[in-house]
Image (spheres, helix red, strand yellow):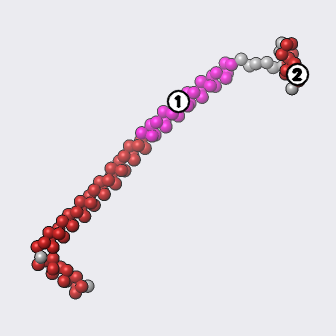
C-alpha cells in the first residue's frame, strides 16, 4: 500500500502548486462539511419550531371546537320540541303528515 501511494505523496511534498491545490481542496471540503452540518441543525431547529407552533394551533382549534360543541348542545336543549302527534297539527296541513 505504501508503495502505491508513495509517488503521490512524494509529488505533493516536492511541488508547491500541488500543495496549494491540495490545501484549497481540503479547505473546500471542510467548508462544505461545516455548511452541511449547519444546515442539518437549522433544519432541525425550524422543524421543532413548526411542531411547537402547530401544537399550539391544534390546541386552540380543539378549544374552539369544544366551545362550538357546547353551544350546539345548549341550542339543541333550548330548541322547541316540535309536534308530537298528528292531532296537534292544524287541519289545513294535517293531510300532508297523515298521507305519509
Q: Where is 27 relative to 52, above or below? A: below
Q: Earlier in the sequence, mark 1 or mark 2?
A: 1
- Residue at 76 percent of width and 18 percent of height: 82
Q: Circles 1 and 2: CB distance less than 8 Å?
A: no
Task: Kindly state the secondary structure of the residue where label 1 is placed.
Answer: helix
- Residue at 11 percent of width and 78 percent of height: 14
- Point out which mark residue 27 bears: none
Q: Which residues are magenta?
A: 53-79
Specify whether residue 57 is painted magenta.
yes
- Residue at 44 percent of width and 37 percent of height: 56
Q: Can residue 88 be seen here? A: no
Specify whether residue 17 is painted magenta.
no
Q: Can residue 46 be seen here? A: yes
Viewer-closest of 52 and 99: 99
Residue annotated with mark 2: 98
Residue annotated with mark 1: 64
Task: Kindly state the secondary structure of the residue where label 2 is placed.
Answer: helix
Amino acid at each position: 500500500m505504501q508503495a502505491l501511494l508513495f509517488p503521490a505523496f512524494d509529488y505533493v511534498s516536492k511541488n508547491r502548486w500541488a500543495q496549494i491545490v491540495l490545501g484549497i481542496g481540503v479547505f473546500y471540503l471542510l467548508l462544505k462539511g461545516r455548511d452541511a452540518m449547519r444546515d442539518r441543525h437549522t433544519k432541525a431547529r425550524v422543524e421543532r419550531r413548526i411542531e411547537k407552533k402547530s401544537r399550539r394551533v391544534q390546541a386552540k382549534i380543539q378549544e374552539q371546537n369544544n366551545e362550538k360543541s357546547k353551544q350546539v348542545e345548549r341550542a339543541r336543549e333550548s330548541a322547541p320540541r316540535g309536534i308530537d302527534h298528528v292531532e296537534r297539527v292544524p287541519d289545513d296541513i294535517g293531510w300532508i303528515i297523515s298521507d305519509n
